[in-house]
């Protein structure tokens, strides 16, 4: 079978890596891919971004299955486009992807279907938004309605920060259309976890649990990032919490979408806040896998990813099983100097040619140019490893990191610390 993966990050490298282990898969194309996928002879990078050109490519190459990594092409309607051309694709339609591409859509949906989430109101005009903040007071959370590459959420600890965020979005239009509406919501406290499932519109196949680390610096200090590391499983998701998430969030979401006439196909990601008292609230939906959670999750996947996603694309998930490695997988992101504000690009990356078992270096912001591997984005690599415990997986990752060098590389030294404290 011929498979096409859309995207260029660590998530897509991990998806392609896992697909390459399937005996059914003969060719793997990645549009556009990165330096790491370019260097691997199992993959072929295709330099295309425009979804219409990608569809033409899929027809010409008779691609059997396309898998969409990031949210942007989903929100542009790549799934609708491929289906209209009778091409097999795994992902949500443009309407279903609104669960991620519009926070207002998602909140309204959760309220209508009684899915636990923070109290909120949506505003289009600054005056009313400011007044609401004056009534509710900080801490409070301001969210741009649309996609903002992970920068659209401000957790305001003071009223001033909240008012400033509203002005930034509704007055100065700094996010353009994505910030033309803002969701203002109640500040929640607890421990976060990522909960992802695969859905074919009817049947739900839960993936292993995981936890991301959003802040740049150790001890969850510093600015928010796209994610500096992750591990799976997440012990904070106990059996009881797992059941609660399925019953109160996942089933109601999938059933609610079907009831609303927008059946959900694809990866559904619920960002969770788990409170001390064991309550679970939905912080957000994403309509794709998380990055860097994908890297540890897929390292633990024992089943054939191609079979699962092919069956899902054909709405035949009901007879599909999924098996996990019982060990812990952990990923640490190596980011370029200046990330997240001003990532420095074009630094040469040196990776020792040394194989360390049960580990893999997934590429994200890398490019291969003039026989050199260079940094080309904020998050450069995700070093991932398996271990019999969080501690063991962590030690192995840091051992592999010692084989990698580039100028100004920054990474966290404490990925997995919550799980270690949990034990
Ligand atoms: N109601 C809330 N209370 C407290 N913190 C929150 C709340 N909503 C969001 N956050 C914090 O802000 C982060 C980003 O929020 P959210 O996930 O909604 O934004 P996003 O930009 O869609 O993120 P992503 O890039 O992961 O898709 C969350 O991971 C959480 O740490
Ligand atoms: Mg999101």
Image (tube, helix red, strand yellow):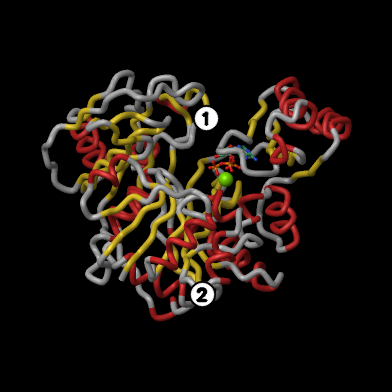
Mark 1: give few (<14), some (14-19) or many (20+) Cα within 10 Å. Answer: some
The x, y position of residue 191, in whole percent, is 51, 41
Vertical comparison of 387 with 126: above or below: below
Q: Residue at x 72, y 40 (%)?
A: 177
Q: Quadrant of ligand 1?
A: top right
Q: Secondary structure at mark 1?
A: strand
Q: Residue at x 38, y 31 (%)?
A: 376
Q: Which numbered circle lies on residue 17?
A: none
* The CB of the residue at mark 1 lies under 8 Å from ligand 1: yes
The x, y position of residue 197, in whole percent, is 47, 62
Tell me if 138 is positioned left or right of 419 in this view: right
Write down the quadrant of residue 114 in the picture: bottom right
Q: Which numbered circle lies on residue 224?
A: 1
Of badges 2 and 1, nearer the viewer stands 2
The x, y position of residue 300, in whole percent, is 29, 56
Q: Which numbered circle lies on residue 86?
A: 2
Tell me if 355 is positioned left or right of 34 in this view: left
Q: Secondary structure at mark 2?
A: loop
Mark 2: give few (<14), some (14-19) or many (20+) Cα within 10 Å. Answer: few
Query: Could you tell me which quadrant the C terminus lies in?
Result: top left
Contact (Cβ within 8 Å) of mark 2 with mark 1 = no
Vertical comparison of 397 with 23: above or below: above
* The CB of the residue at mark 2 lies under 8 Å from ligand 2: no
The x, y position of residue 302, in whole percent, is 26, 63
- Identify which residue, 263 or 4, lies in the foreground: 4
Vertical comparison of 101 with 411: above or below: below
Tell me if 76 is positioned left or right of 129 in this view: left
Residue 244 visible to the viewer: no
């Amino acid at each position: 079978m011929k498979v096409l993966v859309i995207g260029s990050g660590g998530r897509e490298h991990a998806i392609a890596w896992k697909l390459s282990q399937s005996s059914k898969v003969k060719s793997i194309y990645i549009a556009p891919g990165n330096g790491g996928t370019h260097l691997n002879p199992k993959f072929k990078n295709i330099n295309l971004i425009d979804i219409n050109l990608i569809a033409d490519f899929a027809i010409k190459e008779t691609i059997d299955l396309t898998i969409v990594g990031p949210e942007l092409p989903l929100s542009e309607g790549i799934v609708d486009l491929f289906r209209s051309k009778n091409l097999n694709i795994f992902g949500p339609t443009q309407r279903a992807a609104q669960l991620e591409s519009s926070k207002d859509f998602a909140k309204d949906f959760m309220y209508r279907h009684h899915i636990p989430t923070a109290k909120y109101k949506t505003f289009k005009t600054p005056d009313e938004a400011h007044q609401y903040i004056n009534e509710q007071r900080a801490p409070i959370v301001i969210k741009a309605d649309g996609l903002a590459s992970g920068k659209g959420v401000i957790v305001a600890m003071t009223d001033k920060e909240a008012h400033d965020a509203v002005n930034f979005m509704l007055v100065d239009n700094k996010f353009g259309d994505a910030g033309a509406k803002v969701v203002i919501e109640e500040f929640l406290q607890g421990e976060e976890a990522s909960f992802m499932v695969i859905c074919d519109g009817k049947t739900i196949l839960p993936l292993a649990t995981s936890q991301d680390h959003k802040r740049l610096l150790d001890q969850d200090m510093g600015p928010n990032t796209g994610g500096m590391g992750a591990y799976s499983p997440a012990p904070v998701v106990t059996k009881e919490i797992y059941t609660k998430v399925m019953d109160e969030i996942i089933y109601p979401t999938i059933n609610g979408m079907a009831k609303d006439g927008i059946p959900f196909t694809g990866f559904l990601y619920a960002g969770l806040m788990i409170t001390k008292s064991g309550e679970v609230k939905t912080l957000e939906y994403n309509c794709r896998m998380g990055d860097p959670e994908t890297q540890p999750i897929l390292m633990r996947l024992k089943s054939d990813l191609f079979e699962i996603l092919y069956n899902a694309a054909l709405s035949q998930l009901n007879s599909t099983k999924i098996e996990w490695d019982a060990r812990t997988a952990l990923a640490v992101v190596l980011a370029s100097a200046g990330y997240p504000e001003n990532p420095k690009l074009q630094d040469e990356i040196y990776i020792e040619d040394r194989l360390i078992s049960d580990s893999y270096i997934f590429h994200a912001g890398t490019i291969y140019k003039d026989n050199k591997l260079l940094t080309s984005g904020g998050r450069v690599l995700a070093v991932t490893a398996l271990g019999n415990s969080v501690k063991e997986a962590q030690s192995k990752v840091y051992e592999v990191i010692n084989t990698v060098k580039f100028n100004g590389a920054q990474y966290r030294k404490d990925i997995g610390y919550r799980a270690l404290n949990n034990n």
